[in-house]
Image (cartoon, rainbow, N blue to C red):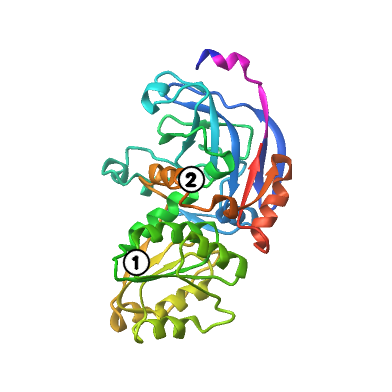
Amino acid sequence: MSATDRDLPAKMLSVVTYGPRDYRLEEIPVPQIGPGEVLVKIEAAGVCASDVKCYVGAALFWGDEHREGYCQPPITPGHEFVGTVVALGEGAGEKYGLQIGDRAISEQIVPCRDCRFCRTGRYWMCERHDVYGFRQVAPGAMAQYMRFPANARNYRVPPTMPAHHAALIEPLSCSIHAVQRAEIDFADVVVIAGCGTLGLGMVCAARQKNPAKLIALDLSPHRLQIARKCGADLTLNPQETDVIEAVRDLTEGYGCDVYIEATGHPAAVEQGLHMIRRLGTFVEFSVFAEPVTVDWTIIGDTKELNIHGSHLGPYCYPIAIDFLERGLVPAEDIVTHRLPLKDFDRAIEAVHSGAESIKVVLEP
């Protein structure tokens, strides 16, 4: 470890989850680092909808093993973050181009580098799948300090970027990847369902593809207003408008060319299947709290759709950093809440309710 480690405290404050709704602010040891590893002092950590699913105890399958919770407690949650480098393990500075005092971020997944997906460059589908804040081998960022393991994928973040903006790099990377999966063409009518942090990032990314028409859907008038700032040509509220008919009316009855689902609500999946044209492209991004059942005949025999999943933000972090640097994302509008670490419970509940929040950021 760098000589600066002697200046670090032995203990730090950290949120620790022990199970559904059992989250505690505790004093735990500051992580120790080894060769190739990085220690950062956290400046900002975002709260994600998947953090909420861990909080409420949503079930998830890890490989063939069913777990009662969405994460593996006890663990420090948090996979959206930025921090200042305070210590570097042997070789880490050279490997990542980092120095003490640099601002840095790490991709949300720490790939094993050994499985068939990692060996072929598709690391985001790593079979072991160690994601910060969910697997015990990779504690997350809702703490004062955080360790980036030797296999992590790390990047420098410009010092001029506000920390609460930099906390958007991870979700924005996911949004960009989803838009890449959509394979948008210039003549396409694109519909993005859901204008939370991820959906708004998708609107920003899709705008750079310059489709013929970019439509955003959400139940919140405020979020739709921000979607227009992100570049949406048209915003529709399904509670006020028959959005399926509205999109068909705009497309000579055919339906949209591309539909990206980012609501996390089962009804939005069925909505998209009816809204999209034959031979259209449907991108599913959301993580659902329950199984979703749809008529697969629509996908196959009726419309012969291209169904694409989207997971994490592979190879997109430099693009996301560039988007934020160039002001292509209205970060001040998207980050609605900035709270101290001690108010983590308020932060999680704000995301859970979704009534007034979009992106909630903790600042240790």
Residue to which mark 2 is pinned: 169
Residue shown at 56%/64% (left/top)?
A: 289
Task: Look at discs 2 and 1 and give the one toward the viewer.
Answer: 1
Between 119 and 82, the one lying in front of the other is 82
Between 231 and 236, the one lying in front of the other is 231
- Above or below 60: residue 9: above
Question: Looking at the rendering, in which quadrant would you find the C terminus?
Answer: top right
Q: Label 2 crowding class (10 Å Cα cut-off): few <14, some 14-19, many 20+?
A: many
Residue shown at 56%/39% (left/top)?
A: 162
Residue 68 seen in this snapshot: no
Q: How far across and down, in percent of the image, does residue 120 sit?
A: 26, 44
Q: Earlier in the sequence, mark 2 or mark 1?
A: 2
Residue to which mark 1 is pinned: 211
Q: Label 1 crowding class (10 Å Cα cut-off): few <14, some 14-19, many 20+?
A: some
Asked if residue 66 is among those painted magenta in the image, a careful observer would answer no
Tell me how far mark 2 sits from mark 1, CA to CA: 24 Å
Disc ID at residue 155: none
Residue 300 seen in this snapshot: yes
Picture quadrant of residue 309: bottom left
Q: How far across and down, in percent of the image, does residue 204 sit?
A: 45, 57
Q: How far across and down, in percent of the image, does residue 209 sit?
A: 34, 60
Element type at mark 1: loop
In screen coordinates, is 364 left or right of 168? Answer: right
Highlighted range, magenta: 4-13
Element type at mark 2: helix
Residue shown at 29%/66% (left/top)?
A: 186
Q: Residue furthest left?
A: 120
Under mark 2, the amino acid is: Ile
Under mark 1, the amino acid is: Pro
